[in-house]
Image (cartoon, rainbow, N blue to C red):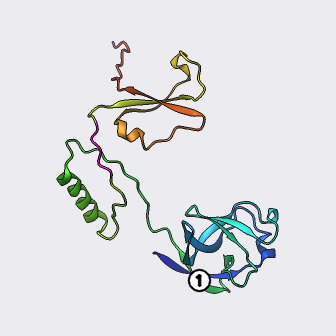
Amino acid sequence: MNTEKVTARRLTAGEVSELGLQDGIFVPAETDGLPLDCYAPAFLTEPGKNFEGGSFTARTIFGEEVSVLPDNAEERGVWVADEAGEEIEVLQSAGVLLNLALFVPEGNKESLESLYSAARDAFGAGVVQRWSEEVVAVPDVKVDLFEEPARGRKNASGQNRDRRALDIYPTRVRFLEPSDGWKFIVELHKEVVDDTPTI
């Protein structure tokens, strides 16, 4: 866990109620509901004046929503950077979590181990981890992916269709989500032929 010391002071509920959406604060850090022994940079989910009852909701830069009662002495409260304050530990962004789907032609166990070893060599053995692994045999074909309105008319022409991705493998489609109100159309890949007349 990567933290740094920041000089800050604790705010009262009255001071938090005067904050807007752009004001940076520090709230108790947690991940998936598990509290961490430090703070995280955050912003209120709505202007402080809109909250009632002394309870405020903030969203950390890591995407977690945290409810806090600044005036509750049993909680760690809401803090703001202030050179005249005291030091607190603040969680820093230490990297990026990647969900990877890898297509390995004629893949076998040795090929996958080589990929894993290369990643560990590049980023460090303690950094690269396999959280889950699914090995699926896939046909060596490619597809074109389109989007069209979810309630499109049957037998409608392709005018309502947006190109999302051409020339991709079918397994990759499983990891994509359509735009709101649209659905995916998957077709076998067709080579794009440029029939523009040339001189």
**Quadrant location of the C terminus?**
top left
Say what amino acid the circle numbered 1 marks. Ile
Residue 65 percent across, percent down from the top left: 63, 64
Can residue 137 be found in the magenta stretch?
Answer: yes
Residue 16 percent across, percent down from the top left: 76, 72
In the displayed structure, does residue 117 sit left or right of residue 66? Answer: left
Where disc 1 sits, the SS reads: strand
| Image quadrant assignment for residue 187 | top left
User: Which residue is painted at 63% across and 87% down in the image?
Assistant: 86
Residue 124 percent across, percent down from the top left: 30, 68
CA neighbours of label 1 inside 10 A, class few (<14), some (14 to 19), many (20+) = some
Can residue 44 be found in the magenta stretch?
Answer: no
The magenta segment is 134-138
Asked if residue 82 shows in the view, the reply is: no
User: Which residue is painted at 25% across and 45% down in the image?
Assistant: 104
**Quadrant location of the N terminus?**
bottom left
User: Which residue is painted at 59% across and 19% down in the image?
Assistant: 153
User: Which residue is painted at 31% across and 65% down in the image?
Assistant: 123
| Image quadrant assignment for residue 56 | bottom right
- Vertically, is 39 above or below 120? below
Foreground pick, 60 / 152: 152
- Vertically, is 91 above or below 49? below
Asked if residue 65 shows in the view, the reply is: yes
Does the magenta stretch mainly form a helix, a strand or a loop? loop
Which residue in the structure is indicated by mark 1?
88
Residue 8 percent across, percent down from the top left: 65, 81
